[in-house]
Image (cartoon, rainbow, N blue to C red):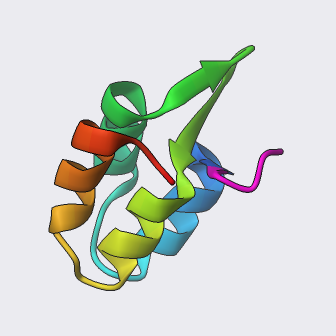
Amino acid sequence: MANGLIPAREAARVLRGVGIGVEATYALARKHGVRIGKRLYLPRALVEGLVAGDLEAIRLIREGGAK
C-alpha cells in the first residue's frame, strides 16, 4: 500500500470515531478515492483532515490532490 492511500475499510473504522458513518465513508471513497482491483482507497490526507476537523480537506484534495 502506498503511503498516500488508506483502504476504505480502515478509513471507515477511523472516521466512525468522529461521527462519519460507513456509508458516507464509502461515498467519499467512490468520489475522491481510487479503486485498485476490487478495493477502494482514500487519500490519507483527506482522512487525516476529516479526523482533525478540517473540512477544507475535501477542497484541497479536489483541487490539488494528496501531497
Residue for point 55% across, 67% down: 13
Foreground: 6 or 56?
Answer: 56
Q: Position of residue 3 (x, y in %)?
A: 74, 56
Q: Position of residue 43 (x, y in %)?
A: 51, 49
Give the image quarter of residue 47.
bottom left
The verdict on residue 4 being magenta is yes
Q: Is residue 58 left or right of residue 23?
A: left
Q: Position of residue 11 (x, y in %)?
A: 54, 59
Foreground: 46 or 8?
Answer: 46
Quarter holding the N terminus is top right
Residue for point 47% across, 49% down: 66
Q: Which range of residues does the magenta coloring cover?
A: 1-5
Give the residue at the far right of this rendering.
Answer: 1
In the rendered image, the vertical position of residue 10 relative to residue 15, given as above or below: above
Give the image quarter of residue 8.
top right
Q: Is residue 14 left or right of residue 65?
A: right
The verdict on residue 26 being magenta is no
Numbered label tally: 0
Give the image quarter of residue 20.
bottom left
Main secondary structure found in the magenta portion: loop
In the rendered image, the vertical position of residue 41 relative to residue 37, given as above or below: below
Q: Position of residue 5 (x, y in %)?
A: 64, 48
Residue for point 47% across, 62% down: 45
